[in-house]
Image (spheres, helix red, strand yellow):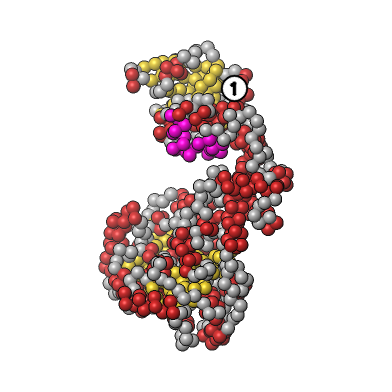
């Protein structure tokens, strides 16, 4: 038996259980089984006394003798019980299943080692279905270690594949493999970082004898996992770099210079300048740019986008901006036209609701090259949209678009255009390295001058009267107000009703003001109309769902009220808050929650009240929720499934892995040298089942 053997042939499995392992856990081979890592370890290194049992202990190991062994009930209602006692007290052990098997083991004169989860029932502690064995020198020794526990499904348990069974299978597997398991990392890496060899790491990850060794095993396996992810991402971008050339934009010319000198309404911030230099360098390099521009809400990404587009136009190319919603696309279109003024650049807006006649005109002008800048939604990626010479694609709010959609834009010219992805959802560095690992990253880490920090407050629902007073004061001072309600698909009907009831509530309680309402279910024209009223100041209050989350810019709006704030993620709250604080006035964000909230929610609200920094908030979000649920990653999807590493906690190892991967690829881009062959082999094996985005175009 070796590690590539079919799991079915492992002693104790057989076809039926092998089938379940394949279906439920994608475990096909012995190797797959060995890399099914425990999700937790339980300390069996110590034996407790009965009197030490308390509600905080989840699992406990006890030693003692039995008395009152008793079987009651018939058939399905059978129950076997006994009291385990030591010098400090007694605890009841209970079995409802497997009674016949346990029964034979229970004797009143032997000393037992018992392990299980105590539960408190009718004033006494009970352990249901404990592990029980006669204490002897052998299992006494076993107790010195940490016991691994594995996730299993209900169906697996039904077929006797519970955690203990998996542990036994892993044990058998490790025993049955004759030769040492071959190393999967090059020797030079194992040596350089003093990593535990794979074989030892696998033994210690499943059967750790000491905390120290478990740590070393985890370290090695996490490093390996993160390193290969980085190597895979970076190898793909290397490959792409070698395969595709990028358009060269050698000059900065009339449009850029004229705009910069005569049209720019304000001095660029230092951060905007820095980022523009990075972009400029890419565009002149001959490599295709794939850059992520991260910048907090209000940091001025639009201007960076526009100036980059002017570089393209100055070099005879067209540019486009793709935004996730119609509102946003329209706003970009308006902003950009306003900024461009009379400079002489032609722009057009293309969305799902563009009329046929207008659409046809746009198609013609795009093809002829008459149109310089196209702004729009998903409509841009349709096949019927053909450019004369597309040189730069800007994607706003990336996380709403999938990787596949991004890749589609590559085909819009004979060679892929430069890509600038803009996101206002700052994501922690570790996550960016993985989710956007194939993109270079630029960060605008400075807000335009003169902005006052938004003041954030957390109110319980019972403070509504005070809230109404505050709102009317603000509006009377000339400001405008957003009131945002959560709306998710699963509870869409109730959410919509809440929104509408909210609208009525504010209409009744603030009758002196005009109110707009927007939600995703409205017709585009109606939405537009409501938005226009708010933008023009005709209405002072905007009741909305998160459709206004991204991009909407009304500088006079200075209050953001978020209803049921407990239902939003941290990054989303920060996004919403970013809709205010865009003008010169002091702005406010008010988070409303019910009085009864979890400690975690409370902590989230506290972070919001305390911090205005998107990166800090997203880092907190990552720590609290883990990468799977983070805004900004769910839609685009994590390209890799992590088996052991954790992006929230292993950022150091991730950076190390990335650094090493870059070093290796710089020296040996196609990983051909003899010492690196193992890397190619492992990469091919590991990426067999993932999509290779680099060849999508
Ligand atoms: P975001 O990064 O969220 O897309 P915007 O591009 O919408 O930010 O810019 C937010 C606001 O800041 C806009 O009103 C814009 O005109 C203004 N702005 C951008 N850059 C500067 C600057 N350098 N100085 C002053 N105001 C700026
Ligand atoms: Mg924006």
In the rendered structure, the answer to whether residue 504 lies left or right of residue 425 reads left
- Residue at 52% in and 58% down: 695
On the image, the x and y values in percent for residue 653 come to: 63, 50
Tell whether position 381 is magenta: no
Q: Which residue is mark 1?
A: 139
- Residue at 57% in and 19% down: 135
Tell whether position 18 is magenta: yes
Image: 122 above or below 36: above
On the image, the x and y values in percent for residue 415 come to: 53, 68
- Residue at 49% in and 15% down: 105
Residue 516 vs residue 318, the one in the foreground: 318
In the rendered structure, the answer to whether residue 500 lies left or right of residue 615 reads left
Image quarter of residue 103: top left
On the image, the x and y values in percent for residue 600 come to: 47, 50
Assign the magenta stretch its main secondary structure. helix
Residue 568 vs residue 302, the one in the foreground: 302
Query: Dot 1 lies on which element?
Result: helix
Image quarter of residue 541: bottom left
How many marks on residues? 1
On the image, the x and y values in percent for residue 568 come to: 42, 57
Residue 525 vs residue 610, the one in the foreground: 525
Confirm or reject: label 1 Cβ below 8 Å from ligand 1: no
Residue 588 at least partly seen: no
> Badge 1: few (under 14), some or many (20 or more) residues near its Cα, within 10 Å?
few
Image quarter of residue 615: bottom right
Image: 159 above or below 462: above
From the image, which quarter does the N terminus lie in? top right
- What span is in magenta? 16-40
- Residue at 47% in and 31% down: 18
Residue 596 vs residue 43, the one in the foreground: 43
Looking at this rendering, what residue extends furthest in the front direction?
414
């Amino acid at each position: 038996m070796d590690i590539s053997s079919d799991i079915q042939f492992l002693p104790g499995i057989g076809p039926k259980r092998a089938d379940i392992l394949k279906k439920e856990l994608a475990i096909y081979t012995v190797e797959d089984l060995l890399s099914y890592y425990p999700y937790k370890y339980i300390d069996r290194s110590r034996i407790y006394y009965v009197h030490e049992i308390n509600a905080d202990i989840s699992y406990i190991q006890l030693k003692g003798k039995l008395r009152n062994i008793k079987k009651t009930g018939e058939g399905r209602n059978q129950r076997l019980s006994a009291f385990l006692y030591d010098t400090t007290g007694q605890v009841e052990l209970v079995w409802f299943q497997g009674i016949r098997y346990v029964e034979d083991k229970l004797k009143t004169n032997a000393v037992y080692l018992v392990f299980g989860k105590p539960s408190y029932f009718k004033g006494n502690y009970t352990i249901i279905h404990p592990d029980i064995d006669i204490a002897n020198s052998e299992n006494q020794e076993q107790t010195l270690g940490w016991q691994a526990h594995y996730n299993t499904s209900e169906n697996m348990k039904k077929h006797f594949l519970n955690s203990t069974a998996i542990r036994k299978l892993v044990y058998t597997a490790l025993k049955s493999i004759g030769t040492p398991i071959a190393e999967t990392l090059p020797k030079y890496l194992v040596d350089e970082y003093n990593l535990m060899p794979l074989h030892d790491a696998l033994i210690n990850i499943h059967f750790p004898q000491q905390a120290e060794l478990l740590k070393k095993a985890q370290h090695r396996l996490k490093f390996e996992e993160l390193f290969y992810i980085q190597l895979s991402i970076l190898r793909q971008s290397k490959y792409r770099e070698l395969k595709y050339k990028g358009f060269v934009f050698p000059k900065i010319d009339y449009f850029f210079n004229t705009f910069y000198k005569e049209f720019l309404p304000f001095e660029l911030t230092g951060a905007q300048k820095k980022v523009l230099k990075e972009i400029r360098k890419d565009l002149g390099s001959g490599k295709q740019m794939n850059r992520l521009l991260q910048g907090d809400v209000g940091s001025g990404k639009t201007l960076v986008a526009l100036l980059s587009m002017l570089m393209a136009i100055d070099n005879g190319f067209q540019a486009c901006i793709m935004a996730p919603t119609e509102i946003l696309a329209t706003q970009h279109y308006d902003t950009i036209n306003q900024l461009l003024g009379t400079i002489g650049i032609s722009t057009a807006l293309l969305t799902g609701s563009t009329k046929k006649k207008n659409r046809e005109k746009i198609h013609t002008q795009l093809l002829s090259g008459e149109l310089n800048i196209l702004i729009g939604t998903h409509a841009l990626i349709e096949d019927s949209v053909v450019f004369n010479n597309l040189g730069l694609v800007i994607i706003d709010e990336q996380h709403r678009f999938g990787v596949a959609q991004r890749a589609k834009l590559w085909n819009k010219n004979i060679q892929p255009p430069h890509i600038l992805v803009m996101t206002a959802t700052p994501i922690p560095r570790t996550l960016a390295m993985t989710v956007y690992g194939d993109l270079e990253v630029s960060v605008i880490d400075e807000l335009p001058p003169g902005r006052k920090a938004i003041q954030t407050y957390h109110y319980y629902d019972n403070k509504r009267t005070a809230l109404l007073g505050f709102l009317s004061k603000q509006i009377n001072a000339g400001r405008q107000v957003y009131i945002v309600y959560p709306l998710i698909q699963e509870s869409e009907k109730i959410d919509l009703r809440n929104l509408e009831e909210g609208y009525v509530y504010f209409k009744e309680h603030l009758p002196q003001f005009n109110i707009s309402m927007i939600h995703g279910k409205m017709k585009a024209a109606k939405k537009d109309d409501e938005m226009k009223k708010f933008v023009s100041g005709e209405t002072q209050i905007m009741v909305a769902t998160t459709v206004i989350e991204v991009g909407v810019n009304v500088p006079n709006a200075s209050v953001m009220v978020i209803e049921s704030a407990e239902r939003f993620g941290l990054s989303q709250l920060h996004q919403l808050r970013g809709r205010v604080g865009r003008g010169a006035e002091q702005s406010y964000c008010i988070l409303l929650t019910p009085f009864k909230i979890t400690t975690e929610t409370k902590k989230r609200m506290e972070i919001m009240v305390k911090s205005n920094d998107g990166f800090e908030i997203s880092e907190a979000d990552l720590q609290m929720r883990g990468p799977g649920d983070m805004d900004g990653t769910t839609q685009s999807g994590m390209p890799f499934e992590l088996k052991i590493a954790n992006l929230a906690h292993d950022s150091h190892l991730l950076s190390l892995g990335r650094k090493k991967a870059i070093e290796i690829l710089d020296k040996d881009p196609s990983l051909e040298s003899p010492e690196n062959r193992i890397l190619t082999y492992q990469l091919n094996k590991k990426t067999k089942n993932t999509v290779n985005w680099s060849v999508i175009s």
